[in-house]
Amino acid sequence: MFDVAVGKTRERSPGTFDQWFGGIQFDDWTGEVLTLRAQNEFVLDWVRTNFWPDLREQLLTLSGISVQVSWILDPHLERPVSLATMTQPVRPRPLSLPQPEDLRPSYVTAVDRMPVVERRRVSPEDINPRFTFSNFVVGPSNQLAHAASVAAAGGGGRRYNPLFLCGGTGLGKTHLVHAIAHRVYEERPNARIRYLSAERFTNEFITGLQHHRMDEFRSKYREDCDVLLVDDIQFLAGRVQTQEEFFHTFNALHNADKQIIVTSDKYPQALERMEERLVSRFASGLVADIQIPELETRVAIVRNKAALEGIETDDDVAIFLAQAVRSNVRELEGTLIRLAAKSSLTGRKVDMEFVKAELQNTFVHRTQMLSVEDIQRAVCQHFHLRTSDLTSKDRHKTIAFARHVAMYLCKQRLTCSFPELGRAFGGRDHTTVMSAVRKIETQREDDPAVRAHIEAIERKLAVE
Ligand code: ADP
Ligand code: MG
């Protein structure tokens, strides 16, 4: 059953199927729970976002069971698929239909054909072969972050050390960090590159403590390291001991003039429950933010992605998609991939007619079409206010509270920057928005009445 379902999905997908499913293995299927093993986080994330919804639908049709998937991260899956592509330029691949021998629970066939390459200090399975500078579309929204990343990769010097990349989810932070790792490796193959998420740093630190292997941990990150790249540093929030360890790691590397690159979903000063001395270290080099890309950049990203994946589209489709999905590049790419997968099933071209019909009914379309104005409207309906109240200077308690909730929801749902939100709320300073968002975040946790308000508005937005 599983083979058939996977086979069908494979048929529906563009040429990337092998690449992503090479890093996934079938483990078990008991009752409603399907256990899959993923070679690393980005393969897991990609498959979960782009293939799992269709797979689940197929499984439901075939078996009548609403299957839940349980993921296991297993970096030791044999010969990850990314090894091969690490050494080759990425090219669009033609859509390949499944061969009977491929319809197996685990996609070992694809993996078996891959050549083996030498292991490096940055283990290739940690670095996405597609996240290179040449695959990154540069526009006004990410120009500074891109230029700073290129400079840091080239050993840019103290001005870029540390380099702190920040921006909303799905806007290209991880892509840039991987691109830096690729570039450093190309230019200085002997450089000792360490790339990891802050979560993994935390886990390794805890394991080091538990097994009395702190010396090993410390020499790995403080001495045996020329370039340290840490993704999603906001994960350290409230983890006092790990922050302390990271602080010393940071200092050891910085004092030795080793390059440090950190990413975060917030500016250093906006990081919550982060030690002040770390915040000031993060802000001491170059802080480069990534904003939501402008329409032109989004169109270029769609075109670029379509070319990489071998998806044939028209220009008007690229523009339409870029208009429909505004605030998150990951969603934009995901939408294109899903459309391509569907079109290959029916043998139809990804043209305007097809795209419009498909997007009309999808959830993605609805949520991505949300704007600041939609959120302001929903909040005002809920609190019986006028939208102009939210942008006014009125500090009346109810109005101020509604304004803060609206700012909070915008930040949650739209990936706008704080300055953009400040402008959308009557030209307020970005620090005002920051503290409003933080206040509501805390109140949402502590105060059931606040939680109830927010949930009611969220329900309103869900049916918009
Ligand atoms: P983040 O780490 O900021 O959440 P990612 O780096 O994971 O975001 O990016 C999400 C997806 O969007 C990735 O597939 C990435 O390749 C793509 N992406 C983001 N920005 C760009 C860009 N400027 N050009 C090309 N692809 C991009
Ligand atoms: Mg990321």
Image (spheres, rainbow, N blue to C red):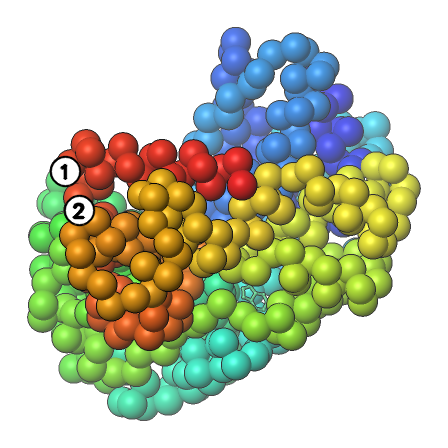
Residue nearest the viewer, comparing 341 with 70:
341
Looking at the rendered structure, the kind of residue marked 2 is: Thr
Nearer the observer, 333 or 182? 333
369 in relation to 103, above or below: below
Q: Are marks 2 and 1 in contact (CB under 8 Å)?
A: yes
Residue 389 in view (yes/no): yes
**CA neighbours of label 2 inside 10 A, class few (<14), some (14 to 19), many (20+):** few
Q: Position of residue 131 (x, y in %)?
A: 55, 65
Instruction: From this view, report whether residue 306 is shown above or below residue 135.
Output: above
Say what amino acid the circle numbered 1 marks. Answer: Asp
- Residue 206: x and y in percent read 17, 45
Relative to residue 348, is residue 357 drawn left or right?
A: left
Q: Which residue is mark 1?
A: 446
Q: Residue at x 17, y 46 (%)?
A: 442
Quarter of image, res 169? bottom left
Q: How many marks?
A: 2
User: Which quadrant does the C terminus fall into?
Assistant: top right
Q: Position of residue 449 (x, y in %)?
A: 20, 34
Q: Position of residue 226 (x, y in %)?
A: 31, 75
Residue at 65% of width from left, 74% of height from top? Answer: 296
User: Between 35 and 258, which is closer to the camera in this rendering?
Assistant: 35
Residue drawn at (37%, 48%), measured in percent from left and top? 380
Residue 281 against residue 233 in the figure, above or below: below
Question: Residue 382 occupies which quadrant of the picture?
Answer: top left
